[in-house]
Structures are given as structure tokens and as C-alpha cells.
């Protein structure tokens, strides 16, 4: 990969933050790959890990790694051992800590899922997803609607921590600010989660009502950092570059950053992030050839992830094409054909028609990508906002929230 660096002066670079401690794990570079449904499977995480390690080498801090979280799986599907869910919790042999994100709406299923993960030695870290804003989830009281019900939230977190503690596996929570500006939950939910024994709290600085619109509120992350002193606070939302990550730390005081959409089609962002936190200015500026090499490698890893099913891997890689090519002068015909690719051989043929020497386009290739969306009224179960405790009708509704979920 083409790496550029400004002259760093004579002195050795100093890390910008101490290592991130998540329970018994020390994460050398305080960077977390955000769980993303349909994206952060074993194949994509492998790419991100490789680039993260390059960044650490560039920063002179070899060996210390970041944390790469799997896409969420539902507790129920895990307990039922659905084959697709079992695939999603796979890790590479050299992946450490092995991180799994769970989506749960019920303490008993949460306990069973966590028990399974730890007794079968399938995870070293478990993250709980309380940030999903998707209407079909919040309508049943799940995801980002759930922390509004203090008793249920506390029971789920407590159940997970108790089961995971049997094998000393740390549990973290990831959440949004709340349902909307009038119904914020992050401060009291974080407090409850800390009391229940979580090892860190991550905040995406948006409400469910914002979905992915507007700008993430980093002031809320700062507020959370001021309120939570006993465990690390991780900031999330709108980090598109290593410079954004440094700025978030400077503005909020957070202990680490969680990066989602910024690395779509750009796994080498982890090189930049690791280098930046190691105190260097080394940044990857890939040529088109280096980008298509990465894209090709991604497709190859996906093929392995899908047990050799090339067509399935190609269908999966299609959604990444526009992100990889963002800002490059690759013609619309080749883009369109890449977005329909159905075999690795076809992918190779199309890549061969592009000019590998085209340099990194700079600005047009940077910045926002992935989900955007517009603000909306959050779909909720009837009378959800009337009380912060769950009533019996709502208990029945929320039990269905786990049945069909995808994405956060
Ligand atoms: C395609 C996609 C899938 C996502 N899936 C999940 C998920 O499974 N679990 C979760 O907690 N958040 C999920 N998120 C939210 C991200 O983890 C992250 O909180 C959000 O994108 C904001 O961070 P960013 O601005 O760095 O992207 C998803 C986001 C996207 C764009």
C-alpha cells in the first residue's frame, strides 16, 4: 500500500492514548471496528486486522491490535444454533480477542446465549446491541427503544455479565443517545450498565429518531465520559478519517473510538487509525491498483467464508464496489459490470480493464459513505413512553422483537 507521511521531526512518536482496557484484554490501539450487519464478518474483519497491523508497524508499535467486532447475531438464533448464525460467530484462528455482538430482548435468552458462547469457548468479548433504530425492531420495543425500559435493560445486561463472568469474558454495551431528544436514555442506561458490571460503554451520538441523519452529537459522548469514570467510554459516530478520530478524542475525552461506515470500501483506514494513535502522520493513499487488489482479496476471503461458494461471495462483494471505487475515475460501465459480478474470474477480467496507476483522488474518495437516511418518528409499542417500566402487554410484544432482525 502506498503510505505517505509528513516528516515527523527527530523524536520518536508517542502514543496519543494509553491502551484500551476491556476487562482482561488490553487493546493496544484504542480503535474498535463497529459491528455492522452484512459487513463485519470474518472476511472483512481479516482485511481490517491486516491493515490495522500495518498501521501499528508504521507507528513502531508492532503487536498491539485493535478490537474488531462481529456483526450482530440474535440471542435466540444463537441458542437455536441457526447455521447462518453459527457462521457469523466464526473467527480466524489468529483473531484475538474474539468478539461477538449479541442482540437481545429477553434476559433468559440472553443468559442462554452468553452461556453457550463462553462454555463452548466461542468468544473472548461480548458486546450487547442497544442501538438498532430499524422500525421493525423498535416497533416491538427492541434495539434503541429498549433502554427506555429500565428494568428490562438492567435485567438483560445483568444476565449477560453474570454468565460471561464465569469464564472472565468482559461484556460491553453499545447504545444510542435515546429514542428522541425528549426521551434520552444514555446517561441512566450507562449508569445501570456499569452497576451491572460491564467493562465499557460505547455511545453512537444519535437518537433512534435521527436514524443516520444529521451529525453525531459528540457533546453527548463528552457528557457520558464525564459521568462514567470506572470503565472506558467509547465514542462512535461520523469518524471518516484518522483526523476525525483524533478530534473526537480531543473534544470528548473518550477512551477509544468506534468506527463504522468510514471503513466501508476502505479497510486501510485501520492503518491510518493505528498510525495516528501511535503518534505518526503515516496515512495510506492507495492507487486504483492497490484498491482493486484489496477488493479482490475481500472477494477471495468471502469465498472462503461462504465455504467456497463463489457466487454467494460475489453477490456479497457487489454492495462494496461503489464504496471501494468512490472518487476514482473508473468509468460507469466497469462500475456497473462490477456491481453484477458473479465469479472471481469475471472480477479479475473487469479489474484488468482498469488502470492500476491511477493515484488516490484525495477529497472525492474521502468523507461520508454508507447509510444516511432522514429523521423520523420512532415506531414504538403502544404506550411505550408512558412509563419507564415494562407492563405485561409490553413484555409479550418485546418477546417478538427478536424474531426478524438485521442491522443496527
Ligand atoms: C450497514 C450497517 C450495519 C450496522 N449493523 C449494526 C449492528 O449489527 N450492530 C450495531 O450495534 N450497530 C450496527 N450498525 C451501527 C454502527 O455500528 C455504528 O454505530 C453507526 O454506523 C455509526 O457509526 P459510524 O458513523 O462510524 O458509521 C450498523 C451500521 C451500518 C451502516
Image: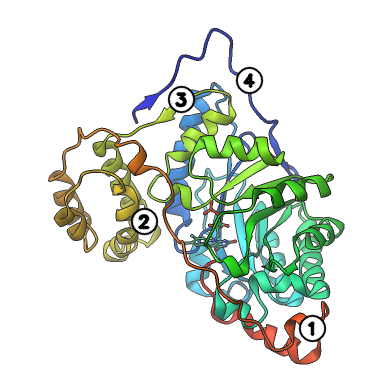
SS at badge 4? loop
How far apart marks 2 and 3 lie (CA) works out to 29 Å
Task: Label 1: state its secondary structure.
Answer: helix
Task: Using residue 99 as the reference point, say whether residue 345 is left or right of it.
Answer: left
Which mark is drawn over residue 146? Answer: none
CB at disc 4 and ligand 1 closer than 8 Å: no
Q: Is residue 89 above or below residue 288?
A: below
Camera-side residue: 344 or 120? 344
Q: Which residue is mark 3?
A: 282
Asked whether 360 or 201 is in front, the reply is 360
Give ligand 1's quarter of the image: bottom right
Q: Which residue is mark 4?
A: 14
Q: Which residue is mark 1?
A: 386
Residue found 81% across the figure and 65% down from its top: 158
Q: Are marks 2 and 3 in contact (CB under 8 Å)?
A: no
Q: Between marks 2 and 4, how big is the CA–CA gap?
A: 37 Å
> Label 3 CB, ligand 1: below 8 Å?
no
Q: Nearer the viewer, mark 1 or mark 3?
A: 1
User: Which is nearer the N-term, disc 2 or disc 3?
Assistant: 3
Can the viewer see residue 50? Answer: no
- For mark 2, give the secondary structure: helix
Report how far apart the C-alphas of labels 1 and 4 lie in the structure: 51 Å
Q: Which residue is mark 2?
A: 302
Q: Residues within 10 Å of mark 3 (few under 14, many from 20)?
A: many
User: Is residue 34 shown left or right of residue 228?
Assistant: left
Q: How many labels sit on residues? A: 4
Q: Position of residue 68 (x, y in %)?
A: 56, 48
Q: Residue at x 33, y 43 (%)?
A: 364
- At label 1, counting other C-alpha atoms closer than 10 Å, the crowd grade (few under 14, some 14-19, many 20 or more) is few
Between the C-alphas of marks 1 and 3, the distance is 52 Å
Amino acid at each position: 500500500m502506498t503510505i505517505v507521511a509528513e516528516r515527523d521531526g527527530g523524536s520518536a512518536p508517542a502514543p496519543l492514548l494509553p491502551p484500551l482496557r476491556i476487562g482482561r484484554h488490553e487493546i493496544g490501539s484504542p480503535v474498535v471496528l463497529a459491528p455492522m450487519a452484512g459487513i463485519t464478518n470474518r472476511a472483512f474483519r481479516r482485511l481490517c486486522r491486516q491493515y490495522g497491523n500495518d498501521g501499528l508497524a508504521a507507528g513502531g508499535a508492532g503487536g498491539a491490535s485493535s478490537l474488531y467486532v462481529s456483526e450482530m447475531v440474535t440471542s435466540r438464533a444463537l441458542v437455536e444454533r441457526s447455521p447462518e448464525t453459527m457462521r457469523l460467530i466464526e473467527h480466524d484462528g489468529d483473531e484475538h480477542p474474539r468478539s461477538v455482538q449479541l442482540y437481545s430482548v429477553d434476559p433468559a435468552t440472553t443468559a442462554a446465549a452468553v452461556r453457550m458462547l463462553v462454555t463452548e469457548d466461542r468468544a473472548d468479548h461480548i458486546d450487547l446491541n442497544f442501538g438498532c433504530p430499524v422500525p421493525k425492531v423498535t416497533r416491538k420495543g427492541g434495539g434503541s427503544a429498549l433502554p427506555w425500559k429500565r428494568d428490562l435493560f438492567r435485567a438483560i445486561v445483568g444476565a449477560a455479565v453474570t454468565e460471561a463472568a464465569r469464564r472472565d469474558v468482559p461484556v460491553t454495551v453499545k447504545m444510542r443517545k435515546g429514542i428522541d431528544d425528549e426521551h434520552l436514555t444514555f446517561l441512566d442506561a450507562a449508569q445501570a450498565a456499569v452497576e451491572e458490571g460491564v467493562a465499557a460503554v460505547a455511545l453512537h451520538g444519535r437518537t433512534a429518531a435521527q436514524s443516520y441523519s444529521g451529525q453525531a452529537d459528540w457533546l453527548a459522548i463528552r457528557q457520558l465520559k464525564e459521568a462514567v469514570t470506572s470503565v472506558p467510554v467509547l465514542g462512535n459516530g461520523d469518524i471518516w478519517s484518522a483526523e476525525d478520530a483524533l478530534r473526537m478524542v480531543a473534544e470528548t475525552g473518550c477512551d477509544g473510538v468506534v468506527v463504522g461506515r468510514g471503513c466501508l470500501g476502505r479497510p486501510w483506514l485501520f492503518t491510518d487509525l493505528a498510525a495516528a494513535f501511535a503518534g505518526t502522520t503515516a496515512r495510506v493513499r492507495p492507487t486504483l491498483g492497490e484498491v482493486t487488489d484489496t477488493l479482490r482479496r475481500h472477494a477471495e476471503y468471502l469465498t472462503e467464508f461462504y465455504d467456497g461458494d463463489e457466487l454467494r461471495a460475489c453477490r456479497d462483494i457487489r454492495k462494496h464496489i461503489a464504496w471501494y471505487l468512490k472518487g476514482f475515475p473508473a468509468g460507469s460501465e466497469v462500475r456497473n459490470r462490477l456491481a453484477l459480478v458473479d465469479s472471481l474470474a469475471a472480477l479479475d477480467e473487469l479489474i484488468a480493464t482498469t488502470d492500476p496507476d491511477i493515484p488516490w483522488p484525495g477529497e472525492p474518495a474521502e468523507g461520508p459513505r454508507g447509510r444516511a437516511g432522514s429523521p423520523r418518528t420512532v415506531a414504538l409499542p403502544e404506550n411505550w413512553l408512558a412509563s419507564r417500566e415494562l407492563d405485561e402487554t409490553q413484555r409479550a410484544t418485546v418477546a417478538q422483537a427478536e424474531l426478524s432482525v438485521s442491522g443496527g
